């Protein structure tokens, strides 16, 4: 049995959707950030990075969303969540996932977690001002150039899609109008219609 440690409002949602899409047997532990559970000894014993998501497996713990979703895809090949067997297509998937996790996701985080990068209140305020511009530019590039359609990589759904879905859901939170990203907005609607996504969102809502 896999155990996913996640928290509401985080990219852990993408991993949970990937687990549901794969038909995996798993359970979920939702940490309460308001109570700083991610910094308490019980969770630090699982993930000393003090972050989510983390996936407990029978061989140990995997951290970082791209690694977790890659593991899910490789251990559930029947779900066909990555283009295995095609080296170039796999590299394209890894390229998009790397861009999402190394640039797009942190760009969004700078608005809400400026204290990670600065102590000066003026600097934190500037990060908060600038972050939506950087996040929006990255998402616009995806919308206009990198998104294949109808899914992130083209005709086949992949683990890139739940990651992109969660990031798109953050656009309004970061003062950006989803209507300015029409292809991603359409993708977001179609993602929300998938049974796995609906099931996971219902579970999150139920707590």
Image (cartoon, rainbow, N blue to C red):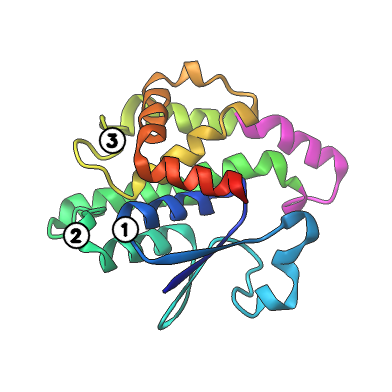
Across and down, in percent, residue 203 comes to 53, 49
Q: Residue furthest top?
A: 179
Q: Is residue 103 left or right of residue 72?
A: right
Question: Which of labels 3 and 2 is toward the front?
Answer: 2
Q: Earlier in the sequence, mark 1 or mark 3?
A: 1
Across and down, in percent, residue 72 comes to 34, 63
Q: Earlier in the sequence, mark 1 or mark 2?
A: 1
- Label ID, residue 23: 1
Q: Are marks 1 and 2 in contact (CB under 8 Å)?
A: yes
Residue 41 in magenta?
no
- Label ID, residue 151: 3
Q: Main secondary structure of the magenta part?
A: helix
Q: Is residue 119 left or right of residue 2?
A: right
Across and down, in percent, residue 152 comes to 30, 38
Question: Which of labels 1 and 3 is toward the front?
Answer: 1
- Location of residue 162 with respect to 186 vertically, above or below: below
Q: Which residue is mark 2?
A: 78
Across and down, in percent, residue 137 comes to 50, 28
Q: Residue at x 25, y 48 (%)?
A: 92
Neighbor class of circle 2 (other Cα within 10 Å; few <14, some 14-19, many 20+) is few
Neighbor class of circle 1 (other Cα within 10 Å; few <14, some 14-19, many 20+) is some
Q: Residue furthest right?
A: 121
Question: Which of labels 1 and 2 is toward the front?
Answer: 1
Q: In this orientation, which residue lies closer to the viewer: 177 or 132?
A: 177
Under circle 1, the secondary element is: loop
Q: Residue at x 60, y 47 (%)?
A: 206
- Label ID, residue 38: none
Whole-angstrom CA distance, mark 1 to mark 2, is 9 Å
The magenta region covers: 115-132
- Location of residue 130 with respect to 63 vertically, above or below: above
């Amino acid at each position: 049995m896999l155990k996913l440690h996640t928290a509401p409002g985080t990219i852990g949602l993408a991993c949970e959707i990937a687990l549901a899409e794969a038909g995996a047997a798993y359970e979920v532990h939702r940490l309460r950030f308001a109570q700083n559970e991610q910094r308490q000894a019980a969770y630090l014993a699982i993930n000393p990075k003090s972050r989510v998501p983390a996936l407990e497996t029978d061989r140990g713990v995997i951290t970082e969303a791209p690694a977790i979703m890659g593991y899910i895809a490789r251990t559930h090949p029947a779900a066909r969540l990555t283009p295995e067997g095609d080296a170039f297509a796999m590299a394209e998937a890894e390229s998009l996932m790397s861009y999402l996790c190394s640039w797009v996701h942190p760009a969004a985080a700078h608005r809400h977690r400026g204290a990670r990068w600065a102590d000066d209140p003026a600097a934190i305020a500037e990060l908060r001002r600038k972050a939506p511009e950087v996040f929006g530019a990255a998402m616009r590039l995806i919308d206009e150039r990198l998104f294949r359609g109808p899914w992130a990589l083209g005709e086949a759904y992949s683990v890139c899609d739940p990651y992109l879905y969660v990031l798109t859901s953050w656009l309004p939170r970061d003062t950006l109008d989803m209507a300015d990203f029409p292809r991603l907005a359409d993708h977001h609607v179609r993602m929300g219609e998938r049974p796995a996504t609906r099931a996971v969102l219902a579970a999150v809502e139920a707590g």
